[in-house]
Amino acid sequence: MLQSRYLSRRVSWVAHSSRGELATSRAISESDWKVFRRIHPIALERFCQQVLADVERTAADTQQTSHERYLALYELMRRRDKELADAFDDLRRSTAIERLAGMLFHGLVTDEEMNRFSAEIRETCGSYLGIGR
């Protein structure tokens, strides 16, 4: 997992308003959107590498039967597919902050990459992750 100050406190990254919607569902600036679009495929590749490493470890676990490994792999892929969807699907400017927070939660974005974003985006993502509270 990548080292990042955004992972120093792993808490639920979803901040809900009183209506149960994400608290910051607004479009980001054009410059932040351009940064996000460059980082998105890199973070997706990192996520997939993590999943494949988990698959290899699970499949190689000789302490379990083949069926147990199969079931573990099935559950792993089901869970990780949901995580992938939460962090990477529905790619729009209005959802970019939530997607970026998801990527940070999973340790997929470096501090150097985060520093390319505006201070507003960094602070908003930090508040999603409970940093600075």
Image (spheres, rainbow, N blue to C red):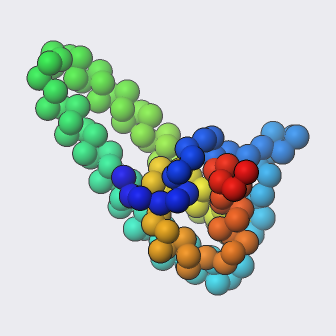
* Residue name at image x 68 percent, y 82 percent: 30
Left or right, 123 with respect to 105, comes to right
Inspect this view and state whether residue 28 appears: no
Residue 77 visible, this orientation: yes
Question: What residue occupies the far bottom of the structure in this picture?
Answer: 31
Q: Position of residue 92 (x, y in %)?
A: 64, 66
Is 76 above or below relative to 96? above
Name, please, the residue furthest toward the right: 18
Q: Residue furthest left?
A: 62
Residue 112, above or below 102: below
Q: Is residue 99 left or right of residue 68?
A: right
Q: Position of residue 51 (x, y in %)?
A: 32, 45
Looking at the rendered structure, the number of numbered marks drawn on it comes to 0
Q: Is residue 133 above or below residue 58?
A: below
Say above or below: 72 vs 56.
above
Quadrant housing residue 94:
bottom right
The residue lying at 23 percent from left, 31 percent from top is 58
The residue at 50%/40% (across/down) is: 82
- The residue at 35%/61% (across/down) is 45
x and y, in percent, of residue 88 in the image = 52, 56
Q: Judge left or right: residue 54 versus residue 3.
A: left
